[in-house]
DNA sequence: CTGTATCCCGCCTGATACTG
DNA sequence: CAGTATCAGGCGGGATACAG
């Protein structure tokens, strides 16, 4: 077939890592785990707004990629602890750097957007 | 309403930047522009597999965020040049760092995936 | 507590064709 | 050359309910 996707993968090895941070939640989850190991319920609460299904999906994916570990404690109320692996910790650094960049440049981006939008409204194309 | 999305935005200012790298192409485009300014057609060729529509969308979004500039030269065959702004250049650094991380750890991730998948197949849950 | 099962929906993406 | 228009599809995400 040689679809656009194939071409794309060939062109960019960074695809995988991008996919890692490309979804809405994983970066958040990693950010939480970078602080300390967390249990499922803790993540569920701290990563506010995430549904259990999606949280599970993310956790599984991260586990599969070797970025986090999943440790089950066979206690009567079952408890599971998720923690960053060294690999996960090493990428969390970059994620945090990216986050810092955002914090530092957020205002500038917001202003750029406002300016852009204002310019658009000022000279709208006739319908 | 207070949807999950609202909660999410409240919880994570990094959302915006994540959205920036969250889609399939923007990081690629920025990567290209980090090398040198490009014209539309050049990007279209170098970012192999992207369709003009999606490329336009990405470019517009990036422009709106103040990460790239769009300069139109009113030549007879119209030509448009896209280039990184200082802001765009500064984030490209992090994107490249992330890319380097991937290159460095790609094998490890691949192995983790294979190991995980093998373990899953070895002990599949009965249907 | 830690998930799983279902169904639904919207967005991003893509293919193709067309225009200034 | 540099886009825009239109239509369709897939995939991730979301809500709710249920289970071990």
Image: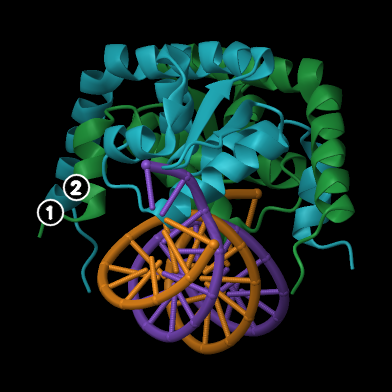
Chain colours: A cyan, B green, C purple, D orange
Q: Is residue B96 left or right of residue A39?
A: right
Q: Which quarter shows the N terminus of chain B?
A: bottom left
For the point 82% across and 50% down, the residue is A7
Mark 2 chain? B
The residue wearing badge 1 is B2
* Labelled disc at residue A89: none
For the point 86% across and 54% down, the residue is B121
Image coordinates of residue B100 in percent, x first then y, are 72, 15
Closest to the observer, B91 or C10:
C10
Mark 1 chain? B
SS for tag 2? helix
Image coordinates of residue A41 in percent, x first then y, are 35, 39
Total tally of numbered discs in the picture: 2
The residue wearing badge 2 is B6
Q: Is residue B16 left or right of residue A127?
A: right
- Mark 2, residues whose alpha carbon is within 10 Å: few (<14), some, or many (≥20)? few
Contact, CB < 8 Å: mark 2 with mark 1?
Answer: yes
In the image, farthest residue toward the left:
B1
Corner quadrant of residue D11: bottom right
Q: Which quarter shows the C terminus of chain B?
A: bottom right
Q: CA distance from mark 2 to mark 1?
A: 6 Å
| Above or below, comparing residue B51 to residue A62 in the picture | below
Q: Is residue B80 visible?
A: no
């Amino acid at each position: 077939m040689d679809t656009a996707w194939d071409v794309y993968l060939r062109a960019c090895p960074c695809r995988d890592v991008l996919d890692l941070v490309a979804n809405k939640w994983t970066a958040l989850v990693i950010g939480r785990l970078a602080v300390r190991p967390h249990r499922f319920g803790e993540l569920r609460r701290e990563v506010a707004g995430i549904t259990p299904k999606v949280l599970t999906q993310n956790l599984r994916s991260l586990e599969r990629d070797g970025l986090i570990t999943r440790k089950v404690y066979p206690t009567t109320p079952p408890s599971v602890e998720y923690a960053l692996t060294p690999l996960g910790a090493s990428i969390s650094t970059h994620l945090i750097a990216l986050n810092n960049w955002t914090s530092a440049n957020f205002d500038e981006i917001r202003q750029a957007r406002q300016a852009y939008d204002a310019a658009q409204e000022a000279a709208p194309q006739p319908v």
